[in-house]
Image (tube, rainbow, N blue to C red):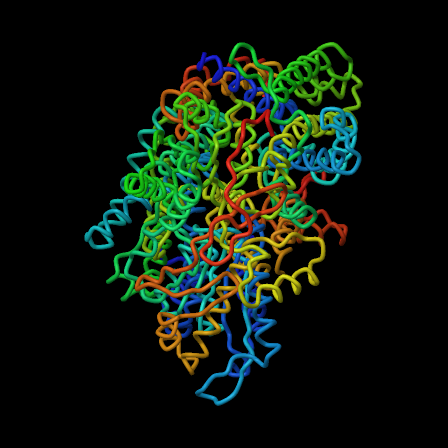
Amino acid sequence: MEMGQFITYGVINGAIYALVAIGLGLIMGIMGIFNLAHGSLAMIAAYISLWFFQSWGIDPFLSIPLSMVILFVLGIGIYKGLFSSMKKFSAGQKLRNSMLVSFGLVLVIENLAVLIWTANERRVNTTYSGLAFDFAGLRVPYIGLGTILLAVVVIFGLHAFLKRTFFGRSIWAISQDYQCAKLMGINVDRTMLIAFGIGVGLTAIAGAVISLYTVSPSIGLDWVNKSLILVVLAGVGSIDGILFAGLLLGILESVSAYFVGVHYTGVVSLIIFLLILMFRPQGLFAKKVGR
Amino acid sequence: MRFFQKKMVIPALIVAFLFFLPLFFKGEYYLNMLCTLFLYVILSQSWNILGGYTGQINVGQAAFFGIGALVTRLLWTSGIPFVPALLGGGLSSVILSLLIGIPALRLRGHYFAIGTLSVAWIALITIENIFPGVTFLPGKYVATYSLLPRYYAFLIILLSAVIVISLAVHSRMGLAMESIRDDEEAAQAAGVNIFKYKVIAFAISSFFAGLAGGGFSFFHVSYYWSMPFALMWCFEPILITFIGGVGTIWGPIIGSLCYVALKESFALTMGEINVLIFGAVFIFIILFFPKGIIGIPEKIREHLTKRMGTNVGRDVLGKSQP
Amino acid sequence: MKKRKFWSLAGGICFSFLFVFVSITFDFAYGAPETIKVGASVSLTGRFAAGGVDVADGYKMAVKHINEDGGIYVKEFGKKIPLEVIIYDDESDPNKTVTRLEKLYSLDKVVAYLGGFSSAMNTAGLAMGEKNKVPWVGVTIAAESVFSQGFKYTFAPCMFSFMEVTAFFDAFDSLPKDKRPKKIANFQLQSDWGIECGKYLKKYGAERGYEIALVQKYAKSTSDFSSLIMAAKTAGCDAVFSVPTPPQSMTLIKQMKELAYAPAATCFIRGPDLSNYWEVMGENANYIITCGEWTADMKYPGNKKLVDAYQEKKPGKIIGMQVGCGYGALQILADAIERAGSLDRKAIRDALTKTDFTTVRGHVTFDERGIGQVPYSLCQWQNGKLEVVINPDYTTAPVLLAPAWDKR
């Protein structure tokens, strides 16, 4: 029964990791842009959810569409301002320069957040915070269940979007071969712009969930580190793989707490990640991206 | 490689100036700033040989910096004189890099990057748990603490790093490394032993990172054991090298200078918004000088010749020639 | 091409040095005896900015009140000289703390240092005080081991690990014998003072008849405490002690609620002492015992003046614990400077060892290590207010035991 509780929390944590990583997976895996500010954008999204809740009492799960729109617009602005000049760069230079620019962006966003909201930790405290379903001793928090459902819906939804819609497939096409896609008549610039906006908009979902836990201006980089591990574990370019990689990581961490103690779970999950990387360097679920 | 070329004059003058500087500026603050600057230059140069010249982006430099600091501090505070302790620190970093490198260097591109980041992260968590406290200098060392030996230690480590790395990149070995960076498959087809050169670059890189760590542990009176393992030490050398100009000897030097000087002057004059402004300036520099600061003269020249309407320095298609 | 590179490099070097020198000299005030300069490196940005800004506010407020009176009377010059506190941002980075303190020493020529916020920065800072032989007075440092190095120039008028644990057991002793918790769970943070608290819990617990039934370790980066909570629940522990900082202090409580674990007494030192804890946690913060170094309604001399002045300056902001602690630290320093009769650093240091003064957070003296002998104090969140429940001078409410979650 104890192990069941550990696994439950592992699944919940994994779902959160996956939700945060999915936007990064789209932007980095498919567009080749290394956005270090991804975690900080999720942090902004969390503050926006907090603001909706405190000003108008809107539940974070319900305010997701609203914050998605705000973040989509923000994403487009960031792309136009910072990353669009990198279109013509080689893959290596694009990765490098986008990493550098986004680092500057992290500093700007984090410090703006401190100025606006102060450095104190905050969270959204709904009526159901802390409450849980009780299945014969196994506790499943309401928020946790909501997170898992959200993760499944979002990730499979995104995967379907990328595979089944024309727009989604044009994003794939661009990632495979930029010139070819252009020749095929795809409006590459506009597609990239919107794809980036979607990638950032996705952080709104992660942000809503994070706001139910805790948010402070400095959480950005920690989330990016975790997300990077997930994106690589899943395999750069794989979208639904991120959910499974996230669940794997979450469960590994929770279960290893039982064996090595909570203070070493980070090490265990990282070691297993490295071992997987050694034997399957392209990631668990990689699709050939032709990079 | 001859040492008495004309282009050596200016660097030699700068080095001489730095050696005699403590005679004019005795202030602790200046020495402290210079030690900080030297530390960043050493760390960035060490990163550059693997990342800039051999093309393997290593995001785990903190592990080597940290091990160097840890071993040096342990040896030195237990009575061993500083220089052997420092070399012990450097050596332990090299051993670590061989242990990690031999499996890790089979990874390519961002997999290597994330893999090394994971290693640094593992090191951080482990050290935080095994050494959760503070390391203090023994009383007698505190009583006789002077910044001068620290300054010269950093300066000497810096010079040896720059000299060794320059020699390495200007030799056949350097040629092999750059060929690996430019096109690994082609290099392999041409008969270059990729693995061997990657390992050598990694070893040199970690050795100097370890020496930098040793310098750090010599410099600070007290600090938490886990501090030199913090992940910022992974990111800063990469940022600095790219800002300065990756794959050049001057790049890390210029980058460190700008990073340290700018950050310090902003922090002292702008209060709460200093990091915000620094971030904005940082973004500005990258957007307008994508090749780094070392590419500024080229950019200015490009700009000027464009305005004058000539095609000097451009090829048939109007693209500028390096 | 190479020539241009050289010139741009030379230009870059000159420019950078010039920039730094110019900005430094702008700050450098000539004519020092016009004010008494003390300096601090505080986290105004970065992870620790919340507490850092509070500490800085405390210092600034104390300086303002002292200068309203004309300043500090220095016998050597036979007059009152205004006090000036120079505060630099260390960006929550101990490396920068060292640099800032060197600047304060060699360029600004301060006569004393004040501490920053949190152990990481303070540990680096107090060592600078010892090295430069500049007296250092700071708060928010709680590890006894840090103060057992034989340093002569460092003073910390705040509660240390062994004091917090003593106060914790005092809280239990204040309850009727049959209501006292029997089995204590120690959620031990793997930090120097977390481990120290664990050591004292065991030692004092044995001396005072309390059982530490469970010890579970966690790290600063831990975000999932379910295994610790389940272990405590299974072992039947009716009290929990820990020293979490935010966000851990919030996650722990949330998960305790999710897992339906409600020990009669929860004592979390540090995290819940933040002024906005109730705002963030709501009713879930009820009954949590936490650090009690200073609150706005303690009746020590000068406290009301501090609180009124702060509320005027920052209306609507709840006053944080560190404002009072910082204010108190500066009061002690000012008192020592006056008793020293001169601006000589050693004289000030000697005067500090003889401190016997009542600040806004209570009466302070120092032992030979520089550890402050301050009132052992704990607070408890009760219905939205941080009540003082353990204190030798003023308590505002008794210790309350917590019922189960669904009965609150």
Q: Quadrant of residue A166?
A: top right
Return the x and y of residue C166 as percentages of the image width and height.
Answer: 37, 47
Counting labels gives 0
Between residues B208 and A118, which one lies in front from this camera angle?
Answer: A118
- Residue at image point 39% right, 20% down: A258
On screen, residue A123 above or below B281: above
On screen, residue A74 above or below C43: above
Q: Is residue A102 left or right of residue A272?
A: right
Between residues B262 and A48, which one lies in front from this camera angle?
Answer: A48
Residue ranking furthest to the bottom: C78
On screen, residue A109 above or below A222: below
Looking at the figure, which quarter contains the C terminus of chain C?
Answer: top right
Return the x and y of residue C207 as percentages of the image width and height.
Answer: 28, 42
Return the x and y of residue C164 as percentages of the image width and height.
Answer: 41, 48
On screen, residue B283 above or below C36: above
- Residue at image point 30% right, 56% down: C148
Between residues A140 and A23, which one lies in front from this camera angle?
Answer: A140
Q: Quadrant of residue C257?
A: top right
Confirm whether residue A98 shows in the render.
no
